[in-house]
Amino acid sequence: MEAKLDLYDKKILYELDINSKIELSELSAKLKRSKQFILYRMKQLEENKIITGYNAIIDMSKLGYFTFRVYFKFQQTTIEEGAKFIEYVKKNFHQVWTITSMHGKWDYALFLGVKTISEFHTIWDGIMLEYKPNIKNYNVAVYAPVYNFNRKFFIDNPQESVERVYGVGEKEDIDELDWKIIENYASNVRQSSIEIGRKLNVSSDTVRARIKRLEQKKVITGYKIGLNLEPLGFVSYRVDIQLLSAKRNNELFEFCKCHKNIYQINKSIGGADFEIEVIVKDLAHLLNLIDEIKIAFKDVVNDVDYFGFSTFHILQYIPD
């Protein structure tokens, strides 16, 4: 059943996806409602499985990682055998921090972080040894930079488009305490520094200072909510755009950044010329959005492909 959101629910989602750690008092002032009202609505959104988390966006490149994206199309493989592939990857390769089932062009996507190319080859060789006869096609791409925007699809006339960039930074010096803070903080940024300090046996002042420094270094590059699209009646697609020319790339970037249904632009080596992530009501809505792009950029768009994500089997914000 599709959830019914009123204007306040939508505004709360909008503001939290701009900054999921926003203070309750600031959110209350923005919406001109009491803190008790805001807190009650947030709890409802959590209980209804619409908000699934309050997350920090971590730039893995600043922690010394290369990010790879691998797509697989399988052949002669049942659903049960596909489930065994997922379990094999989960069990054997801790460097894989996201596994998702897909529909359309690809069956599975793996997103993984490695510190050396040889580490990637170890994972790749392991998968090929076990599953090469089942793999019909694959695509490997270096996945960076990524331009993430706050999601705007649930609100009319959005006023702000915030850009969070990750995947292009130089490695920063991060000590063991920084790591522990990131591990504890990244998946729940609304917990207090006192809570984190108690877990790590350090003062809350130390936690706050370290988080501020991680923000200044752009290790933490932004804050967003985990958002479950299903109860909202929306779905997510990747759209790959093949271009005849790159001469209008800056215009295309701004068009996508401001569009209420586009929330991410991926640059990759080995992928499409221009990759975007979109949120739409259904396939018809997606096709209308694609047509909108084709009309606006008909002199440079050559071809468009799309595919969807169905189930996330692993979704980590930092590697183990």
Image (cartoon, helix red, strand yellow):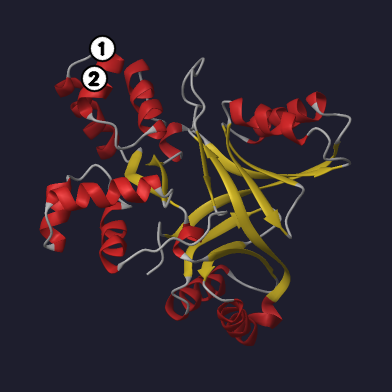
Q: Horizontal and vertical percent for residue 250?
A: 73, 33
Kindly identify which residue carries mark 2.
28
Q: Is residue 318 above or below residue 116?
A: above
Q: Residue furthest bottom?
A: 129
Label 2: which secondary element? helix
What residue is at 69 percent from the left and 74 percent from the top?
Answer: 135
Contact? badges 1 and 2 (CB < 8 Å): yes
Looking at the picture, tell me which residue is in the foreground, 20 or 235. Answer: 20
Kindly identify which residue carries mark 1.
32
Q: Horizontal and vertical percent for residue 62?
A: 47, 59
Label 1: which secondary element? loop
What residue is at 79 percent from the left and 24 percent from the top?
Answer: 296
Q: Is residue 96 above or below residue 155?
A: below
What residue is at 58 percent from the left and 48 percent from the top?
Answer: 146
Q: Horizontal and vertical percent for residue 197?
A: 14, 55
Q: Is residue 1 visible?
A: no
What residue is at 68 percent from the left and 77 percent from the top?
Answer: 134
Give the position of the C terminus as an image quadrant.
bottom left
